[in-house]
Amino acid sequence: MATQSSNVLNMLKEITVKEVDLAAEALARTMKAVTEAESKQALLIEYRQDYVKNLNKILEAGMGAEAYQNFQSFFKKLDQAINGQSDVVAMTKQQVTIQRQLWQESQRKKLSYDVLSQRSDKREQKVEHKRDQKMMDELAMRISRTKHA
């Protein structure tokens, strides 16, 4: 009976090891997605700053109203893209939080099975030790009987 529970625990431990690995991979992917989203956002912000510098240079030289409106329209679209990318960054950060929690849960589950397995192994060792001790006691009694007989 003990070996059957031990086999079940070992199977559960193997499953949880796979779960931990999968959760770690998912966490790594979402963390990479955050880095990429933040990088894209930084590029958009830098791109906007460069256009602001260009606009200031052109304004110093003189610019027509229509060209100025075109710049303003472009800035509005660029700001929308930056805000959209900010939303992407926020969503991917939420995914990291979720994936981290899933990874931690799978870690706890794995550790629980490890503890249960260790306890089961100790119980099996105690039973085996008692059985060995009983056999040794019986053997000692037989030897003692044969000496006295």
Image: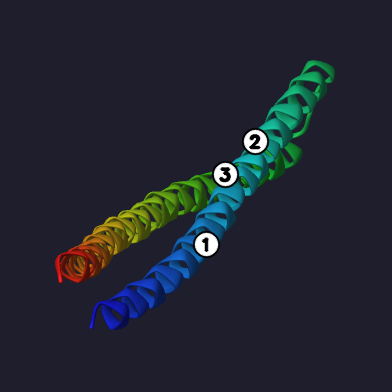
User: Dot 1 corresponds to which residue?
Assistant: 21
Q: Nearer the viewer, residue 80 or 102?
A: 102
Measured Cα–Cα span from mark 3 to mark 1: 35 Å
Q: Is the Cβ of the residue at disc 2 closer than 8 Å to that at disc 1?
A: no
Q: Residues within 10 Å of mark 1 (few under 14, many from 20)?
A: some
Numbered badge on residue 36: none
User: Dot 3 corresponds to which residue?
Assistant: 82
Could you tell me which quadrant the C terminus lies in?
Answer: bottom left
N-terminal of the pair, mark 2 or mark 1, is 1
User: Dot 2 corresponds to which residue?
Assistant: 42
Left or right: 78 as drawn, with respect to 64: left
The kind of residue tagged 3 is Ile
Helix, strand or loop status at disc 3: helix
Q: Quadrant of residue 107?
A: bottom left
Helix, strand or loop status at disc 1: helix
Q: Residues within 10 Å of mark 2 (few under 14, many from 20)?
A: some
Query: Residue at (21%, 71%) from the top-left corner?
Result: 146
> Quick check: 55 above or below 71?
above
The kind of residue tagged 1 is Asp
Query: Residue at (79%, 16%) from the top-left corner?
Result: 60
Q: Looking at the picture, how far across and down is residue 116, in whole percent? A: 25, 61
Q: Is the Cβ of the residue at disc 2 closer than 8 Å to that at disc 3?
A: no
Q: Looking at the picture, how far across and down is residue 63, in whole percent? A: 79, 29
Q: Residues within 10 Å of mark 3 (few under 14, many from 20)?
A: some
N-terminal of the pair, mark 2 or mark 3, is 2
Q: Quadrant of residue 109?
A: bottom left
> Quick check: 77 above or below 125?
above
The kind of residue tagged 2 is Ala
Left or right: 119 as drawn, with respect to 74: left
Q: Nearer the viewer, residue 10 or 74?
A: 10
Which one is in front in this view, the residue at disc 2 or the one at disc 3? Answer: 2
Query: Residue at (32%, 73%) from the top-left corner?
Result: 9
